[in-house]
């Protein structure tokens, strides 16, 4: 993987993920989750959670028209992805909802402005689906991510239990009107 300077020196390109990208999405998802949160969990709980990231699961979502998955590329390297999909969080929608299910950037891409580019794309895509509200969840102690989402108008509307193996975390459910 390129270092942070390599990522900063390149113009990122967003592209729709395809079924051929399933293994790459597994790799990015497991690496970024483990890099960011792995120290919080017993290894067995982390392994059980990461086992849910499978090629077959990604292939199913990549062929389901209800999902929109975008890869963030710098050159030939994938440095992150984001996924919109049907609502799965425990909330009471006030309109036509869609959910930002994952928003992952590798460490080298963080702080480069790529997150803003990716978020603006996902908000536009959410609007294009006809949704009028976008939901997401964020770990209550992930203050950097919470501040980022708040800059886009997301507000906390509740909490839910996010399971990592047998470990229960509290996540905030956040919403923005589109």
Image (cartoon, helix red, strand yellow):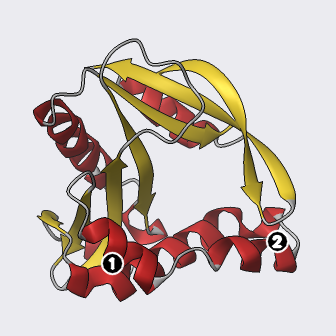
In front: 85, or 153?
A: 85
Mark 2, other Cα within 10 Å: few <14 / some 14–19 / many ≥20: some
Where is the N terminus found, in terms of image quarters?
Answer: bottom left
- Tell me which residue sits at (74%, 80%) in the image: 47
User: x, y (%) of residue 136?
Assistant: 48, 37
Instruction: Calculate the distance from the C-alpha at mark 2 to the C-alpha at mark 1.
Output: 24 Å
**Image disc number at residue 59:** 1
User: x, y (%) of residue 79?
Assistant: 33, 72
Q: Which residue is mark 2?
A: 45
Residue positioned most to the top: 94
Which of disc 1 and disc 2 is earlier in sequence?
Answer: 2
Is residue 49 shown left or right of residue 11?
A: right
Badge 1 marks a residue whose secondary structure is helix
Whether residue 153 is visible = no
User: x, y (%) of residue 85?
Assistant: 34, 48
In front: 24, or 86?
A: 86
Residue 58 sits above or below residue 140 on the image? below
- Tell me which residue sits at (28%, 42%) in the image: 119
């Amino acid at each position: 993987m390129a270092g942070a300077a390599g990522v900063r020196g390149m113009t990122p390109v967003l592209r729709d993920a395809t079924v051929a990208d399933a293994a790459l999405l597994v790799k990015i998802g497991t690496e970024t989750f483990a890099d960011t949160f792995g120290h919080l969990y017993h290894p067995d709980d982390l392994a059980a959670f990461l086992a849910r990231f499978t090629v077959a699961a990604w292939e199913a979502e990549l062929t389901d028209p209800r999902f929109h998955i975008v890869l963030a590329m710098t050159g030939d390297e994938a440095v992150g992805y984001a996924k919109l999909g049907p609502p799965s969080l425990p909330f009471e929608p006030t309109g036509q909802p869609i959910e930002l299910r994952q928003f992952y950037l590798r460490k080298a891409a963080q702080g480069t402005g790529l997150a803003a580019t990716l978020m603006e794309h996902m908000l536009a895509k959410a609007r294009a689906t006809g949704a009028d509200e976008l939901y997401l969840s964020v770990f209550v102690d992930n203050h950097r991510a919470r501040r980022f989402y708040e800059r886009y108008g997301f507000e906390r509307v509740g909490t839910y239990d996010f399971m990592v193996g047998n470990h229960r975390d509290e996540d905030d459910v956040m919403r923005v009107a589109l």
